[in-house]
Each structure stands twice: as structure tokens, then as C-alpha cells.
Image: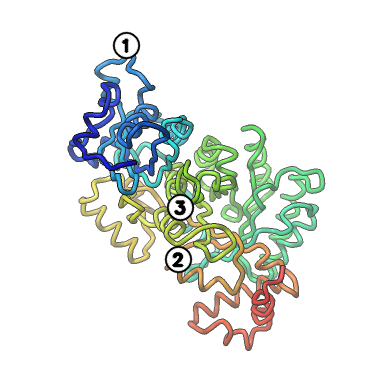
Amino acid sequence: MEKINKEQLIKSLNPHQLGYVNFNLPNPKNGEYLLAVFHLVSGGSLNILQAAAEVAAESSTGTNFNVKTETPFSKEMNALVYQIDQDKNLVWLAYPWRLFDRGGNVQNILTYLVGNVLGMKEVSALKLLDVWFPPAMLEQYDGPSYTLDDMRKYLNVYDRPILGTIIKPKMGLTSAEYAEAAYDFWVGGGDFVKNDEPQANQDFCPYDKMVINVKAAMDKAVKETGNKKVHSFNVSAADFDTMIERCELIRNTGFEPGSYAFLIDGIMAGWTAVQTLRRKYPDVFIHFHRAGHGAYTRLENPIGFSVLVLSKFARLAGASGIHTGTAGVGKMQGSPEEDVVAALNILQFKAKGHFFEQEWSKIPENDKDAIALVQADTSHHVILEDDSWRGMKKCCPIISGGLNPTLLKPFIDVMGNIDFITTMGAGCHAHPKGTTAGAKSLVQACEAYQKGIDIKEYAKNHKELEEAIEFFSKGKK
């Protein structure tokens, strides 16, 4: 569509649309607004500002016409288009955050921002690319409780990624076979085992037996290795009661605190399930699996939201960790521009997104203590342990999807740090000598990285790694 100057754009607005536009909004970052940037392409005869105004109305107080029930106060709750970029089809919206449920309800925010608006015929493309949360709003939401720092303390692992696996095949193993695969990985030196996202209460692998057998396998592995282990159990269920029953089953089986996590299929089960787990179990690592995210986040999808937006809302909701992608290194679609930016935004106290620099501080960013938190975080010190009121704790990037031991260092190089959990499935279980050898090859690849030795050189004296390199370099499946 032909570019129109700002004055002409404003003149093109009808009285209804005018109520949702303010290019002279004083200081949008004054703390009153949640800010959002959308990529927007009009779906018909509307120009970009007209379409943006309709999006602002539908995603806040309005509909497609002025209504007689509108009040002076309700108008104050209007979302406002405060900036546009016609060349890139970008629009900036400011949402009074008083619109949102005061109970820390993340699904309520998303119902506004990416609810009905994604179905509007006035747009042919509408994708939420970035959001900014003001400090006063952050205080209303839970944020993570049990974090990567807590898991590191439990495992006594500080100078490398948490090395994990997903049991494969993802379905079809009995409870005993599943536990055996977990045991094999743990005795090979791995730290973390997770259910795959469809794991539930299948007839061939009853949930209660799977939990009991995993506990026995973990106890044996801990005794033999002398190292703590962690298992992430998928507690996603058909209803609230069953989800909680699964959580309580795990707790009552005798697992040591810190040795288990609760995995929730966050998009499929819903944000209410995520926040329920966070509030009911603040002492447990809440593991957000993002199954289904590609319907919204893939770059070629014109409708939806970005990986960054999903990840930031997971942190806001209180997830301890969320899958953030392999930045193009693994098998899943993704890029450093998407996946690494998302990972850093949920991990760091202050990080640059696609459009906003988010500081996860509940106090003014120019406060000396807020500045000290940013500096301490940059220096990789643990923060917010005894002053949690000052900010929102970190959310851990969880990395899965086609990685294998030969790709550990390439991913670390792209990521730029080691603060993540990697969960290699076939990357360990497909090893020619089996799961234990696969785990050993992963540990050896990590050792090579830590020692600054080329992986092929290190493999000369480490047969499991040598076999992994030979196998995966051939691209066998």
C-alpha cells in the first residue's frame, strides 16, 4: 500500500478510530502502560493506521463502532497506537495495564493482546513481536520461584550446562523400560531426564508405575555415581484434579526435594495450569514445554506472536524454564535472532529484545540497588536470593530438538553462555553403543569444551565421543 504522511493518516480516521490513536502520548514508558509492537498488514481497504486503530480497539475496550455505553473512564482504558513505521509495517501500541486482571493472570493479558484480534478480517498479517512490562506491573505477577540457580545448587553443577535427555522412543516403552533408559543415561554421567511432552497415563506405561520405577532407577544411579539426579515429570492432565494428583503422587513417592520437576505442556494445557503449578508448588522447578508454539511463532506465519513474546510471558507466569529453540543448530526451525534473543531475555535481569530493553525490576531502574542487580547479573553472580522484592527471578532456557554431542559447543558459541539445560534425545540414545555410551559422549564433549580442546582431538582418548562423532557425522538415523 502506498505510503501516506502522518497528517493524512490521522485525517483518514473516523471518530471511533481517533479514540485509539495518540502520536503525542507523553512518555509511554512512564509505568502506566504495557507496550507492544506488532507487524501489521491491512486486510482490505484500510490503511495501516486505520487497521492499527481497529486492532487497538478490539484488543482493549472497543469493538468496530462507538457504543452509547462508553464512559469518560472507560475511554481512559483504551489501547493507543503511539508510533508506526510504514516501511516495515510496524505499529506500537500502549495498553493501560489496569485493564488486566490484578491476580497475576497471564492468560488475561494474552486474551487482550493476541485473542480476538488475530481473527480480525481488517488485517491479513498481525504478529506480536515484542512486549515491555513496566515495574509496577511486574509486581502483580508471580515470576519464577525455583530457578536454574536452585537446580545448580542441588546438582552441584556450576561451570557447564545441565546435561539432559528426553527418553526415546517418545512413546511405546513400558514403565520398566522407561526407567531403564533413564538409569542408563544417569550412570553415563547425565544430570537431567525428562518425559517427552505426550507422556501421560498410557495403558502400556501406567503413570504411577512409571513414577515408582523412575524413583528406584534414580536411587540406584545416585548410589552408583555419587551424584544427584533430576527427573522432569509431565503432569499435564485432562483436569485440575488429575494434574494435582500426579504432582502429589510424585511428592509422596519419596523423591528428595530438588530431584524432580513438574513439566506442563503450557500452550496445550493453558496458562492457568502453568500458574496453578507455580503457586501450589513454589519449591519445584516448573518446566514449560511449548508444544504447539510453531502455529504462532514460526517466522513465515503472518499471524501470532514471536518466540520472544512467548518466552517473556512464561517468565511472567512463573515458569522455571521454557524451551527456547536451538537457534538453527538443531532440527527445529529457528535462528539466533529469534531463539538466542528469547533465551537471554528470560535469563538476564536486563536484556535487549527486538524493540524494547526489558529490565525485570520491580523498583525504579535508576535506583542504586536496581543498578547493582544488573551489574551483579552481568558478572554472573546469583541475584534475588534474599531481596526478591526487587525484581523477577530468572527463567531457564531449555534447549532441545536435534542436538547431539558434536553440536554442544556450536550451540554454546551461538548462545554465548552455559546457563541452560540441554535435553538431547536421539543425540544420546542413538549412539552405536547405546544410551550409557551416548551419555558419556555428551559428558566428554562438555569436558572438551571446558578444557578448550577441539572435540576431535579430545575424542582420540575418549572412545564414546569418538564413536559419536563418527556416527553423527554420517548423518545416520
Residue nearest the observer in this picture, 311 or 211: 311
- Give coordinates of residue 15: x percent, y percent: 26, 21
| Cα distance in 3D space between marks 1 and 2 | 53 Å
Give the mark nearer the N terminus: 3 vs 2.
3
Give the mark nearer the N terminus: 3 vs 1.
1
Q: Nearer the viewer, mark 1 or mark 2?
A: 1
Q: Are marks 3 and 2 in contact (CB under 8 Å)?
A: no
Residue nearest the observer in this picture, 263 or 425: 425
Whether residue 88 is visible to the viewer of this picture, yes or no, is yes
Q: What residue would you read off at disc 2?
A: 415
Q: Nearer the viewer, mark 3 or mark 2?
A: 2
**Residue at x 33%, y 66% (from the top left corner):** 379
Q: Nearer the viewer, mark 3 or mark 1?
A: 1
Residue nearest the observer in this picture, 224 or 423: 423
- Give coordinates of residue 154: x percent, y percent: 53, 60
Q: What residue would you read off at disc 1?
A: 68
| Cα distance in 3D space between marks 3 and 1 | 45 Å
User: In the rendered image of this protein, does residue 186 appear above or below residue 147?
Assistant: below
Residue type at mark 2 is Met
Query: Dot 3, crowdedness within 10 Å: few (<14), some or many (≥20)?
Result: many
Q: What residue would you read off at disc 3?
A: 395
Label 3, secondary structure: give it: loop
Residue type at mark 1 is Lys
